[in-house]
Amino acid sequence: MSPDNAAIAVSILILGFMWLDRDVKDGTSWALWIPVVWLSLAGSRSVSQWMQLGPPVSADQILEGSPLDRLVYTGLLLVGVAVLASRKKQVATLLRANVPILLFFVYCAVSFLWSDFPEVAFKRWIKALGDLVVVLIVWTDPEPIVAIKQLLARTGYLLIPLSVLFIKYFPDLGRGYGRWDGTTYYTGVTTAKNSLGAICLLLGLASVWRIFDDFHERKQPGGTRRLVAQGVILTMVLWLFWIANSMTSLSCFLLASALIAMTTSRAIMRRPALLHVLLAAMIAVCVAVLFLDVSPDVLKMMGRNPTLTDRTEVWSVILGMSGNSLVGTGFESFWLGPRLGKLWAMYTWGPTEAHNGYIEIFLNLGWAGVVLLALVLLTGYRTVVSGLRRALPASSLMLALFFVGIVFNFTEAAFFRMMTPTWILLLLAIIRVPVSSCVTLQTSG
């Protein structure tokens, strides 16, 4: 098949997915398309990269940013804020119920005061604020659970088939080549192998959750066709996992899928303590394998060595450049200016992140940021478990996304990084919905 014909076929397939997943009772707002566009861009490429203007190739370009990207994201953010203004009562209720998250955002804003690049930090904070805006749009939708389903489904129907198309028929877009040995690696709609693994992980989990959910409703009108759509997407995700050889994301996907399956068991729900033990054991196994040299064969199978592909060596270097350990260098300010130039002179592959979310927070926000992050995660976990106990719709998916947020950040920097899909969906999972809203959630499910 020629590339042009393949593109036409995939376009028809995407429309077919949308048709199969349609719901005549879908009462979601048009505003849901704002989170869909935001998450799709976060999970693929920036606007300037889609326009083939290229990624930043120098420290100065990273400092300056792209005017086109800034224009598009600002436009989306302003429209999103306008939507939230029309829902101000629901938004106020949600914000009052999520004080730790607000404190974290406020602290990041205050950190401009000691950043060496306050203007850049401010611009990045505004962009990161967009992540919270789109999450609030979803949770204040007239049908929040349906909105979550549609957000993940529409994003998956777009990014997953396009990744397959790019890899098979448009190699200039969907593949990359090693700088030194010319080895082929696969990126799909993203710009890096790990980024492709991340969207397969997150959107694949959404498909697993939908398959469990739709299977129980298969006798309802449209249940079978929705199962077919999610089954095909999941098959594509597994193929992308295989061809991309993204073992870290695949391992997270398998463990989180097991969590979704297990939390459908009434035995687990009747014994909450068992859930705590199960989750703690899964996280402990990941820590032992990655950091304690337990079962090195497993680490080798994941394509990692004891240095986690040189990550530990980079960690020792950047921790020595961390500056003020109490408050850090300021929001998103570590990988800028002379520090970035020095690191790029040391490492020819040009690192722009710590490849560890916890270290990234420490570098930018210090121990104060780490403590606030811990508070966000602890209260978020309580919210997720509370949802499971009350058998709220989507609670099993929220637990899986929480688990992914914790474990994925062991080897990738995905906490509070502007437009990072793992952070956006973790934020979606840990938002506390007040008890007064539970009736809406129950009817939406």
Image: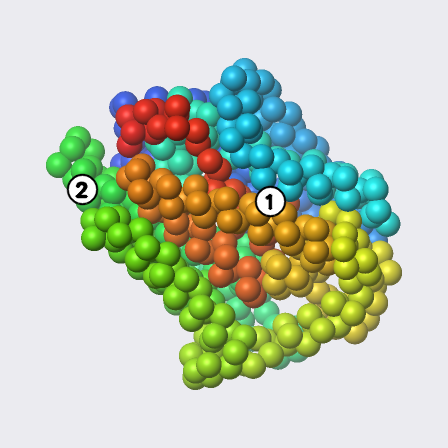
Kindly identify the residue that appears in the image at 36 percent across and 37 percent down: 149
Give the residue type that dot 1 points to: Met
Work out whether residue 46 can be spotted.
Answer: no
Q: Within 10 Å of the Cα at label 1, are there few (<14), some (14-19), or many (20+) other Cα atoms?
A: many
Measuring from the top left, give residue 153's x and y in whole percent. Answer: 38, 40
Kindly identify the residue that appears in the image at 51 percent across and 60 percent down: 408
- State which quarter of the image contains the C terminus: top left
Q: Which mark is residue 419?
A: 1
**For mark 2, what is the residue?**
216
Q: Which mark is residue 261?
A: none
Front residue of 210/69: it is 210
Front residue of 317/284: it is 284
> In this rendering, would 49 be left or right of 57?
left
Front residue of 210/265: it is 265
Give the residue type that dot 2 points to: His
User: Mark 2: which secondary structure?
Assistant: helix
| Residue 343 vertical placement versus 9 (above, below) | below
User: Mark 1: which secondary structure?
Assistant: loop
| Residue 215 vertical placement versus 297 (above, below) | above
Q: Residue lying furthest left in this view? A: 219
| Image label count | 2
- The figure's colour scheme reads rainbow
Measuring from the top left, give residue 309's x and y in whole percent. Answer: 59, 76
Q: Nearer the viewer, mark 2 or mark 1?
A: 2
| Residue 55 vertical placement versus 121 (above, below) | below
In the picture, residue 227 is in which quadrant? top left
Q: Of callouts 2 and 1, which one flags the residue occurring earlier in the amino acid sequence?
A: 2
Q: CA distance from mark 2 to mark 1?
A: 34 Å
